[in-house]
Image (cartoon, coloured by chain):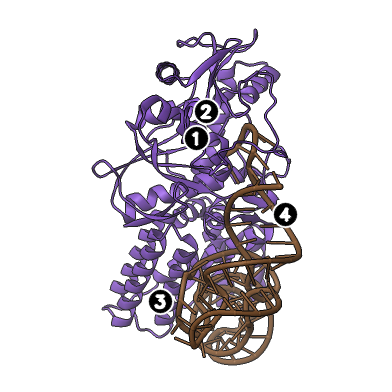
Chain colours: A purple, B brown
Amino acid sequence: MLRLYNTLSRSEEPFEPSRGNTVRMYACGPTVYARAHIGNFRTFVCVDVLRRTLKHLCGYEMHEAINYTDVDDKTIAGAQNAGVSLRDYTDELIRLFRQDAEQLGIEAPEETPRATDEANLRAMGDMILALERNGHTYRRDGSTYFKIATLPQYGRLARLDPEGIRAGARVDNDEYSKDDARDFVLWKASKPDEPSWDVGAGPGRPGWHLECSAMALRLLGGPPIDIHAGGVDLIFPHHENEIAQSEGATKEPFARFWMHIEHLLVENEKMSKSLDNFYTLPAVLARGYRASALRYLLLSSHYRKQLNFTWAGMEQAEESLRRIGDFLARLETVSAGGTYPAAVEAIEKARSSFAGALTGDLNTAAGLAAIFDLVRDINAAIDAKAIGRVDADAARRAIDDFDCVLGVVTLRRAEDAQPPVPVEEIERLIEERRAARGRRDFAAADGIRNSLAERGILLEDNAGGTRWKRK
RNA sequence: GGCGCCGUAGCCAAGUGGUAAGGCAGAGGUCUGCAAAACCUCCAUCCCCGGUUCAAAUCCGGGCGGCGCCUCCA
């Protein structure tokens, strides 16, 4: 069974779905006003690992939703600056997000709702009505607010001081007047040139927090949903406000588990658009690194620890992944028959370590260590000729199973299938080089190897012949 | 001012009471036309101080340092 850290209790708890065998999970997705950066993707990669662990290691079915926030101040401003409609503007950014997510091996969730889809707007309107009925709202200048004084348990997730905001804290001073600084807007009255909808609270647009509550409950059939995930910076106010809305409207607990992913740092500072210290996936690829290596780097430390992004780290991730790739290629060269107890035992040990690591609050770093232990043990067995085809296949299957969760080897393979030099040309040059070596013309042979290396293809000579791989 | 997290070898990173996983880099060796890959060997006593304990990186207290949240933010 999975043990998962729950922000609500600030401790690890055993996890099981509340209804049948299906895990109902929601993660706060991107606000699509600019291309997502790799810090954003840390969250989505970690959520993806949770999803895959639940599916492949725990055997649950998944019903997961990740939303696109496609209306807010920034998206509206972005569309206006670009001179296109809000929908066209966010369509393009969603396309880019999906493209990056796919390159990073992130599985598509079952649901990817958009705030401005009609069914979702209606659900938001219904939620506001329910909140009004329960006495949690007030209107001011055409906007509808949530009055947190009406909800005693407000602040439980973030462990806020019940006395509220103290001297020294920065206080929200936006243009909308509120009864209490902590009150937040549910439905924002629209300005003249802004997109606007009327779903029962007057013409306007959804406040940021409302969409997540409404869409999670509409799509996942809560409350309570099993898991709600997102970046740590969302704990307050976003998730706190989601809880207030959902619980105020339904009078039921909103989510059983809250999972929060720590930040990616750059030069030991939070990577963010406002600090202008972020990298996008294309920027990383442009430096010559692969998406698989980025995914590996993101998995090389625990999701609840800050991770400092560096190019040296990318380099190390590439090298580590190369070791796994070389190992898998080497497994294919095992031709002896039979099986050896030591190999079987090493594989068993790796399987149990890996499962233990991942089901222990998604300890991906320890999971990777289990893989490398296996790599060393089996490599040694190959050297000692103490391994048979049966064992090699079993080792291969073990790595494949691990990768159902980590999703990094599969990505590499897909990348390898598209080398920078056409495969036919590589094979032709390998043949030429083989001939040169045959007549002991090592200068010519080395020349071919060097020129391919410059083009990103490495050659390795083994007993069985020459193998190529991407740099 | 409030709340929280973190500080393990050159770099990255597990371990949260019983005498320090793993990866990268480095050194030496085996193998090899060379190179690569692979294997073997070597490479830390866990920020500092004090305490609890038979026993602490791991618990408690106090420092020092870093980061995050309290405002939009993954």
Residue picked out by circle 3: A378
For disc 4, the neighbor class at 10 Å (few under 14, some 14 to 19, many from 20) is few
Along the line of sight, which residue is nearer the eye, A99 or A33? A33
- Marks 3/2: CA–CA distance: 60 Å
Badge 2 marks a residue whose secondary structure is: helix
Which element carries disc 1, helix, strand or loop?
loop
> Is disc 3 placed on a helix, strand or loop?
helix
Do callouts 4 and 2 mark residues in contact (Cβ within 8 Å)? no
Question: Disc number at residue A220?
Answer: none
User: Image height check: is A379 above or below A73?
Assistant: below
Task: Tell me which chain the residue with mark 1 is part of.
Answer: A
Residue type at tag 3: Ile
Mark 3 or 1: in front is 1
Tell which circle, 3 or 1, labels the residue nearer the N-terminal end.
1
Q: Amino acid at mark 1?
A: Tyr
The numbered mark, 3 or 2, whose residue comes first in the sequence reads 2
Q: CA distance from mark 3 to mark 4?
A: 38 Å
Amino acid type at mark 2: Ile
Quadrant holding the N terminus of chain A: bottom left
Q: Amino acid at mark 4?
A: Glu
- Circle nearer the N terminus (4, 2): 2
Is A163 placed above or below A361 here? above
